[in-house]
Image: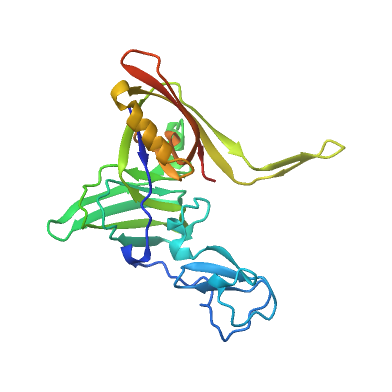
Amino acid sequence: MSLRVVKPLTIVPAMLLSTDVPESDYAPYSAATTYELGARCIVVSDHAVYESLVAGNVGSTPATSPAKWVRVSATNRWKLFDLVNSSRTVRAASLFYEIKPGAAVNALAVLNLSGATSIRIRVTDPVYGLVYDRSTTLISAPAFASWYDWFYADRVSDPQHVALDLPSFPAATIRVDLTGDSSLGVGTLLLGQAKAIAETRYGSRVGIRDYSRKESNEWGDVDLVQRAFARVCSLPAIVPHASKWRTAQLLDSLRATPTLWIAVDDDSLLTVFGWYRDYEILISYPTFSELSLEIEGLT
């Protein structure tokens, strides 16, 4: 079982060829408009939403006026590229993105999905034509389903999908089509090169870091407020002695960097999008070393 990492490719506007997700969260910024406190607008050139910090705000460009404007988020069209996994690009029933990365990529992931029922990924090269076309159903049967559950219980929508077999054509365009219900949304769409850095061993531990509020008053009443959580994962792995220095160099370069960590292919629980808190290489055997990784996912 190879432990793979995918460092996301930064998607810039020139790479996005087409999409059916509108960029109409708010009205575009106008220098002639007077914005009141809390009013919002979008700056299309930045693909960002800004909020006014003062009343009577006129003639102050949002991107260059931090005393009068604050950046709230990417626009709906660009939220899936901002690497903030908790914010989603939403569009009811279906959406598509067509991207020309301008580099060879072999991995694609859509994360923090909501309401998705299927995905189709196509890779088209200008010389060789359509070189990859795969559709996948994202609806799963209930866990531990009995025959009754199989036919009548609610189906569960997979929260993510990872494809690690894209053909590497540097000039190709990649099209992603998602279908779903009225709540269809995508937290992150990332492209990159999947690189094996070690061999995963049995004994991985997976859990969450919960940011929900749990408070008790003097009478013992408990106030529970559900908030975001982050997936945490402890991964044991082994690295051949000949590769330990390259593995350490790669991990050093990924510090404080949102990265997709894939401990086992086709295992959503052991696929985490986040950052590593620390790693340790123990040189314990004549031919290989032990690697331990502590990974924390993005909320």
Q: Position of residue 11 (x, y in %)?
A: 37, 58
Q: Position of residue 32 (x, y in %)?
A: 57, 86
Quadrant of res 57: bottom right
Labels in figure, total: 0
Which residue is nearer to you in this view: 130 or 92? 130
Q: Position of residue 260 (x, y in %)?
A: 41, 42
Left or right of 71: which side holds 13?
Answer: left
Q: Residue at x 33, y 32 (%)?
A: 246
Q: Is residue 65 above or below residue 127?
A: below
Q: Quadrant of the N terminus?
A: top left
Left or right of 272: which side holds 172?
Answer: left
Which residue is nearer to you in this view: 65 or 105? 65
Q: Residue at x 37, y 35 (%)?
A: 249
Hey, which residue is sitting farthest bottom in the picture? 32
Which residue is nearer to you in this view: 90 or 211? 211
Q: Position of residue 250 (x, y in %)?
A: 37, 37
Left or right of 100: which side holds 87?
Answer: right
Hey, which residue is sitting farthest left in the picture? 127
Color scheme of the displayed model: rainbow
Hey, which residue is sitting farthest right in the picture? 218
Quadrant of res 16: bottom left
Q: Is residue 142 above or below residue 200?
A: below
Q: Is residue 16 visible?
A: no
Hey, which residue is sitting farthest top in the picture? 286
Q: Is residue 115 above or below residue 210?
A: below
Which residue is nearer to you in this view: 30 or 162? 30
Q: Residue at x 45, y 35 (%)?
A: 269
Q: Is residue 94 above or below residue 45?
A: above
Q: Is residue 21 visible?
A: yes
